[in-house]
Image (cartoon, rainbow, N blue to C red):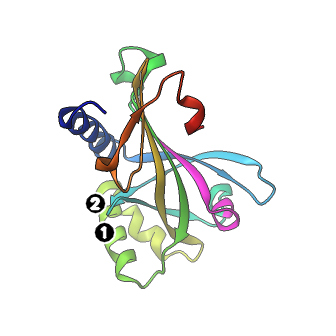
Amino acid sequence: MNSDTDLAALTCEIDRLHRECLSLIMATTNASHRPTASYAPFAHMDGKFYILVSGLAIHGENLKAQQELDILLIEDESKTRNIYARLRLNYRGTATAVQKDSAEHGRAIALLTERAGKTVSLLDTLDDFTMYRLTPTRGTLVQGFGKAFVFDPADLAGGVVQLNEKNIGDYR
């Protein structure tokens, strides 16, 4: 990263995607490592994502079997100038169930309700729905051609690396 200004601009883009995207796309796998792509509305709180999903859904089953997942936030197609260069933010992360009667659960439900509406309160009363905390462990922001950056979501100021032909293998 070249300067504090560059870091501020990246942070601004990351924050914007966290605000503007109401749902995230997730890639999960089952116990046999069979992949599934899905989505869920989310709340972003304390650097983590919170989703409320049914255990009857494939992604709900997968999150119980395998904690590792990939998260994607992506700019709306109608806002992009070039469909190949959409602004996007990927996170590798882990999923952990949040205890229903905890303060963390209450805060996450309140934020999710604010973002996704009153359906959240209804779903939270159903026995098959579980709140998951998705903790990002590595982030990649792609701003367009030749503009991809890898970072530690827990310590953005600790270093952002711009990907190029020489270092991309180190981050796969």
Give the magenta-colored segment's residue range: 61-73
Tag 2: amino acid: Glu
Disc 1 designates what residue?
110
In the rendered image, the residue lying farthest to the front is 166
Disc 1 to disc 2: CB gap under 8 Å: yes
Viewer-side residue, 39 vs 71: 71
Mark pair 1, 2: CA separation: 6 Å
Quadrant showing the C terminus: top right
Label ID, residue 114 = 2
What residue is shown at x 70% (from left), y 65% (from top)? 65
Q: Quadrant of residue 74?
A: top left
Mark 2 secondary-structure assignment: helix
Quadrant showing the N terminus: top left
Tag 1: amino acid: Ala
Q: Is residue 39 above or below residue 81?
A: below
Q: Quadrant of residue 76?
A: top left
Asked if residue 69 lies in the magenta stretch, the reply is: yes
Q: Is residue 165 above or below residue 129?
A: above
Q: Is residue 78 above or below residue 21?
A: above
Dot 1 alpha-carbon crowd within 10 angstroms: few under 14, some 14 to 19, many 20 or more: some
Dot 2 alpha-carbon crowd within 10 angstroms: few under 14, some 14 to 19, many 20 or more: few
What residue is shown at x 63% (from left), y 67% (from top)? 55
Mark 1 secondary-structure assignment: helix
Asked if residue 113 lies in the magenta stretch, the reply is: no
In the rendered image, the residue lying farthest to the right is 32
In the rendered image, the residue lying farthest to the bottom is 101
Q: From the top left corner, tell me how far across and down residue 43 is, in percent.
A: 36, 58
